[in-house]
Amino acid sequence: MPQCASVRNKSSTDQCPSQSMTGHAFCGRHARAKFPRIWSHVNRSKIERFAKVQAVYRGWRVRRRLAWAGPGVLKRKGCVNDEDLMTMESKDRQHPFDYFGIEEAGKIWWFDFGTAWEWIIRSVTPINPYTKVPFDHADLARLRKMHLYRRRWKMPVPPPTKDLAENVVRRWTVLTHIFRSFGFEDAHPEQFANLSHANMRMMFRILIADLQDMPKPNQRFLSLCSRGATGAFTSNIGYMINSLNLATIALTDIQSYDIVFLMVSALYRC
């Protein structure tokens, strides 16, 4: 039953907490009043400010997603390729939130988000399939943010491969992209793909100890590491996949050289 539309009393601007009568906007007490003060009218200025704040926030979210989409997202005329490699969707029909573009030598190449993600997780040094030029680290970072955003908001993302061993390798590949973007160019998935679940737990414990020695440890990252160190799963492969997910989420969000350095150090020491 909806809440009464009136304010509590003449001296209050709070909404009456009573339930309205059936088929009426007011409760029994305010329905008998000669001139009831309507809460939405009394607080109109506040409501308008709230609506403006919501509009600004929604606009910021849209602009952020368009920035992740990259060059050409709103002006497809400059895109060199007319269709996506896998979906064959025309550039003029591709939804802006499913679009991913890169600029290379003054030319714009675009991909469907799913196509780009499936392509980059297969190689430690992914290249533009049209020009054979390696992707820039900044472009890979944009794509990771898009993927993380879509997962958080329950949007479609490419399903993982059913081969569990390959699934783990591809997740290590994404982490390796992050390591390399911070200067650890020798990092390779093959160096970590054979780590066991016991190694991963030890890595998280080492990382937690190193983080606690910092003057101002990142509490969110500490929380994610604690989940990785203590998480219980029915299978070792399930634990590995979840741990790699936590590590990718943490490094995508935080983007700190110090954190990446500590994680790489912990991986080599576990």
Image (tube, helix red, strand yellow):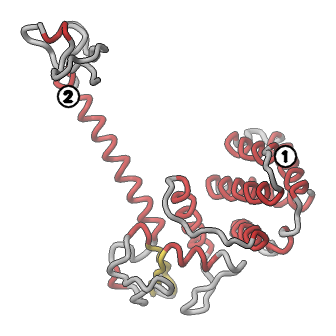
Which residue is drawn at the image coordinates 88% and 64% (left, top)?
195
| Residue 210 tag number | 1
> Where does the image place residue 198, in percent across and percent down from the top left?
90, 54
Q: Is residue 62 above or below residue 75?
A: above
Question: For the residue carrying disc 2, how many other residues have a C-alpha within 10 Å: few (<14), some (14-19), or many (20+)?
Answer: few
Looking at the image, the residue that sits furthest to the left is: 34
Tag 2: amino acid: Arg
Q: Is residue 45 above or below residue 81?
A: above
| Residue 44 tag number | 2
* Number of marks in the rendered image: 2
Q: Is residue 17 left or right of residue 219?
A: left
Which residue is drawn at the image coordinates 79% and 71% (left, top)?
165
Q: Quadrant of residue 107?
A: bottom left
Looking at the image, the residue that sits furthest to the front is: 22
Sequence-first tag of 2 and 1: 2
Looking at the image, the residue that sits furthest to the right is: 269
Q: Quadrant of residue 159?
A: bottom right
Question: For the residue carrying disc 1, how many other residues have a C-alpha within 10 Å: few (<14), some (14-19), or many (20+)?
Answer: some
Q: Quadrant of residue 9?
A: top left
Q: Is residue 205 above or below residue 11?
A: below
